[in-house]
Image (cartoon, rainbow, N blue to C red):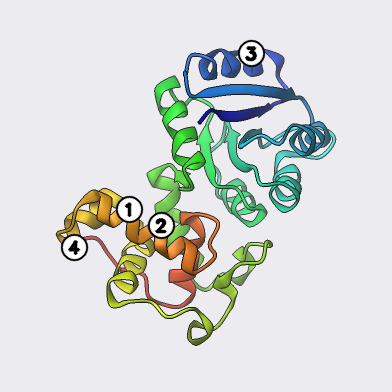
Amino acid sequence: MTIRVLIADDQPLLRSGLRGIITTAADMTVVGEAGTGREAVDRAQRDRPDLVLMDVRMPDGDGIQATATVTRTTAAKVVILTTFDLDDYVYAGLRAGASGFLLKDTGPAELLQALRVVAAGDAILAPSVTARLIRHFTGRPELAITNPDPAAAPLDELPPLTEREHEVLRLVGGGLSNAEIAGRLHISYSTAKTHVAHLLTKLSARDRIQLVILAHRHGIAASARP
């Protein structure tokens, strides 16, 4: 399956560089480019990409506004690109429905891997961003994402989870990767990945970020790493 990518950035040179990186991957193709927030929305609705690489600062509707519209009106997932690793951008992007957050100095190999991770239904955040998200989320209702999700519902109204699924959700909420969950629970990586996939389906969560938010809202996230 070829991953269809739309590049949205107001700098033509950067768009060209990103296109050059993405076209080196046999499993990806660039379906279009946009230089403004409004154009990003229009192209996403017209070209139906799997992923949108979205600059956070653009004219005529910034990247955060464009992300909210794209995730609400299309099936595309959004990875936000920015020069600055600032909390306000991270939180606003997550509220808007972004599935990833990368700095513009991310290396080519890391960028391509991040796109594959998000296209597969996971979420991608730099470890420092994940740590801050977990640390700051609890007790901050203004961080609630705007798109409907099960994290807003009381815990007893959520679909029942098995004991193992509950434990996996707790570890996801603690910021652990699938590999770390496998090690903590003494199960295979593929089994851990399957449990996370089942949680996404059961809880109608868009991606791993929503699972983290859900776990913290209901006080079931792992409090610390060993």
Q: Which mark is drawn over residue 197?
A: 2
Marks 4 and 2, how far apart at CA: 16 Å
Q: Are marks 3 and 1 in contact (CB under 8 Å)?
A: no
Front residue of 11/119: it is 119
Q: Secondary structure at mark 4?
A: helix
Q: Earlier in the sequence, mark 3 or mark 2?
A: 3
Marks 3 and 2, how far apart at CA: 35 Å
Q: Earlier in the sequence, mark 4 or mark 3?
A: 3
Name of the residue lying farthest toward the left? 186
- Relative to 3, say whether 139 is above or below: below
Seen at 50% across and 69% down, the residue is: 203
Residue 54 in view (yes/no): yes
Marks 1 and 2, how far apart at CA: 6 Å
Seen at 42% across and 31% down, the residue is: 113
> What is the three-letter code of the residue carrying label 1?
Lys
> What is the three-letter code of the residue carrying label 2?
Ala
Give the residue at mark 3.
16
Q: Dot 4: within a 10 Å radius of its alpha carbon, few (fewer than 14), some, or many (20 or more) residues?
A: few
Which circle, 3 or 1, is nearer the viewer? 1
Marks 4 and 1, how far apart at CA: 12 Å
Q: Earlier in the sequence, mark 4 or mark 2?
A: 4
Q: Earlier in the sequence, mark 3 or mark 1?
A: 3
Give the residue at mark 1.
193
